[in-house]
Image (cartoon, rainbow, N blue to C red):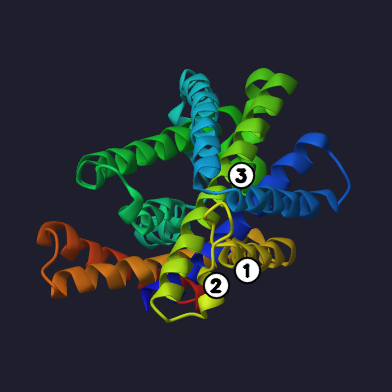
Amino acid sequence: MNAPASSKGSLGLAAVYAYTFGAYVGHAVGGPDWLPPAMAAFAILAMTAINLRGAGQAAGIEIAIVAIKLAILGGLAAFGLSQFDAAKLEIAAQPGLAGVVVGAASVFMAYEGFELVAYDYDEMRDRRRIMGRIMPLAIGSAAVIYVLIALAVPMLTGTQALIENGEVALSQAGQAALGTPGLVLVTIAAALSTASAINATLFSSARLAREVAEDGALPARIGRRNSHGSPQWAVLALAALALALAVLGGLDGLVSGASVVFLLVFGTLNVLAVYENVGSRWVTLPGTIGAFGALTVLLAHFAGLV
């Protein structure tokens, strides 16, 4: 159950990243209405080409992208927080506890990348150290970065502008901080961030599809590798579906849909871990309750009950 559901969520995520890539580039250059979807398609096609060249090519580009975007985002966070004013975080309508849960659950897909790491477990050189020590550090670091950026951006643009222009909020913050150079720098960071996310999603999801195909649950053709060792048909199939979603879908629907899928997947995995007595109960049991609780509140929100 996990593999098909996770693959559907990954398709939505790749579409979200591509859609955002197109939105940032379109905002930066001020082009016609067709430019954002065209750039979204370009991002997926470029990352597909890289993945078809093999794992080494994809991994090397990923490391370089992450280093550059972290440097730019770190600078933006520092600049915004240097002007911290708690009053700028206030909004007219307070969301309440249910609103906080809905907000967090709606963007749960942002943590999907950590699930992708597990798909490549068999290819890791030092699996126990990576999963036991580095993974918690990576998750904690990502959470800290998200919080710092969420606090810094309203200092530069105001909370209302952040709410109304969420698709390009970071580039607006960069422009408010440094003018046109800031807009260019943050657009580069956003473009690199979304491109690397597409790359990672295609990379790991295609390899998951390959493993499922090798186990006989998908057609054998899906797992067939090209001369570079890449599961080419899995990469191409995922890319084609993600491209269609990115061009035809809307950001809110894509984000919410992907978050629903991954809350379900993460909750189910924690249930299985509890049932099989795998891992620490103080992690898996709260994980089960938290994932399914957030999923319930989010679905109630969609139904107009919250």
Of 44 and 208, the residue lying toward us: 208
Q: Residues within 10 Å of mark 2 (few under 14, many from 20)?
A: many
Q: Residue 39 at what x, y percent from top left?
A: 76, 48
Mark 3 to mark 2: distance in Å? Answer: 24 Å
The quarter of the rendered structure image containing the N terminus is bottom left
> Residue farthest to the right?
32
Of 22 and 59, the residue lying toward us: 59
Mark 3 to mark 1: distance in Å? Answer: 18 Å
Question: Are the two marked residues, 3 and 1, in contact with CB atoms closer than 8 angstroms?
Answer: no
Please tell me whether residue 25 is drawn above or below residue 41 in the rendered image: above
Q: Residue 132 at what x, y percent from top left?
A: 20, 45
Q: Which mark is residue 2?
A: none
Q: Which amino acid does the dot numbered 2 rest on? A: Ile
Q: Residues within 10 Å of mark 1 (few under 14, many from 20)?
A: some
Please tell me whether residue 70 is drawn above or below residue 280 in the rendered image: above
Element assignment for label 2: helix
Residue 306 seen anywhere in this rendered image of the structure: no
Q: Residues within 10 Å of mark 3 (few under 14, many from 20)?
A: many
Q: Which mark is residue 195?
A: 3
Q: Which mark is residue 237?
A: 1
The label nearer to you, 1 versus 2, is 2
Q: Is tag 3's residue or tag 1's residue first in the polypeptide sequence?
A: 3
Of 182 and 304, the residue lying toward us: 182
Give the side of residue 102 with respect to residue 190, left or right: left
Q: Which residue is painted at 42% across and 59% down in the image?
A: 99
Q: Which mark is residue 222?
A: 2
Question: Are the two marked residues, 1 and 2, in contact with CB atoms closer than 8 angstroms?
Answer: yes
